[in-house]
Image (tube, rainbow, N blue to C red):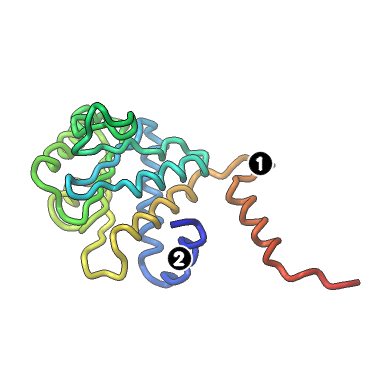
Amino acid sequence: MDAVRVALLREVLAGTEWLGATRRFAGVLRGSVVSHGGGLLLVGTPEYEPWHLAAHLVDEAAWSGTPELAPTLVRHDARPSDPAHLSVGPGRLAAARRGETLLVVSPQDPHAPLLERVHDARRAGATVLSLGPGAGELAALAHESLAVPEGTDLDLDTVQHLVSAAAGENAVPAPRGRRRFRDRLSRLADQLTAPPPTRW
């Protein structure tokens, strides 16, 4: 989903609780990775891997100048022969420590083995965030949780788009005199869509 579609989605959701909730959660995510600087681990379940969110966070990290937002995707079926960015397995969660942030994305409460790894990471000092049903053991383990229960207006994939976009936007503004790429792009779009100047 590109920036234009996210903007249209935000217009549709104006006045609902979703915009505030996703921005708040994105602010916690960004604040955690920026202040701790220990890296972001992103994990789903064996049935649901958050590939899309990983890709969008990598993009937002580059566009916003916040490299800490780029996650390490932890995959349940990772193989040593996979490319480096796809070969990180669940054993990485056992090495999670203070200063690192663990974001767990799941449409349902995860099974016991993943919950145990998340619990161990939290005990070791990692900050745990969850994006999912909002009830159950995962939400209880998380320092911060964004609930996307079934039967709501939005699905989990759409909420991930909103969170990743908001995480990049909430980055520290560029120093005065240097505009961020998105600011320049927005200004150009405004100029191109503005009515022609009146003749004098």
Looking at the rendered structure, which numbered label has been put on residue 10? Answer: 2
Residue 93 in the image, given as x and y percentages of width and height: 21, 33
Q: Which of 51/20 is in front?
A: 51
Residue 144 in the image, given as x and y percentages of width and height: 27, 49
Q: Outermost residue toward the right? A: 200
Q: Which of 51/15 is in front?
A: 51
Disc 2 residue type (three-letter): Arg
Label 2: how many Cα within 10 Å (few below 14, some 14–19, many 20+): some
Residue 7 in the image, given as x and y percentages of width and height: 49, 63
Q: Quadrant of residue 147?
A: bottom left
In the rendered image, the vertical position of residue 44 relative to residue 125, given as above or below: below
SS of the residue under disc 1: loop
Q: Residue at 59%, 42% (x, y): give it.
A: 174
Residue 148 in the image, given as x and y percentages of width and height: 26, 61
Q: CA distance from mark 1 to mark 2?
A: 27 Å
Looking at the rendered structure, which numbered label has been put on residue 178? Answer: 1
* Figure quadrant of the N terminus: bottom left
Label 1: how many Cα within 10 Å (few below 14, some 14–19, many 20+): few
Q: Earlier in the sequence, mark 1 or mark 2?
A: 2
* Figure quadrant of the C terminus: bottom right
Q: Residue at 51%, 43% (x, y): give it.
A: 64
Q: Quadrant of residue 157?
A: bottom left
Disc 1 residue type (three-letter): Arg
Looking at the image, residue 192 sits to the left or right of residue 196; the answer is: left
SS of the residue under disc 2: helix
In the rendered image, the vertical position of residue 123 relative to residue 144, given as above or below: above
Q: Residue at 41%, 70% (x, y): give it.
A: 13
Q: Outermost residue toward the front? A: 81
Looking at the rendered structure, which numbered label has been put on residue 102? Answer: none
Q: Residue at 81%, 69% (x, y): give it.
A: 197
Q: Which of 51/105 is in front?
A: 51
In the rendered image, the vertical position of residue 169 relative to residue 94, given as above or below: below
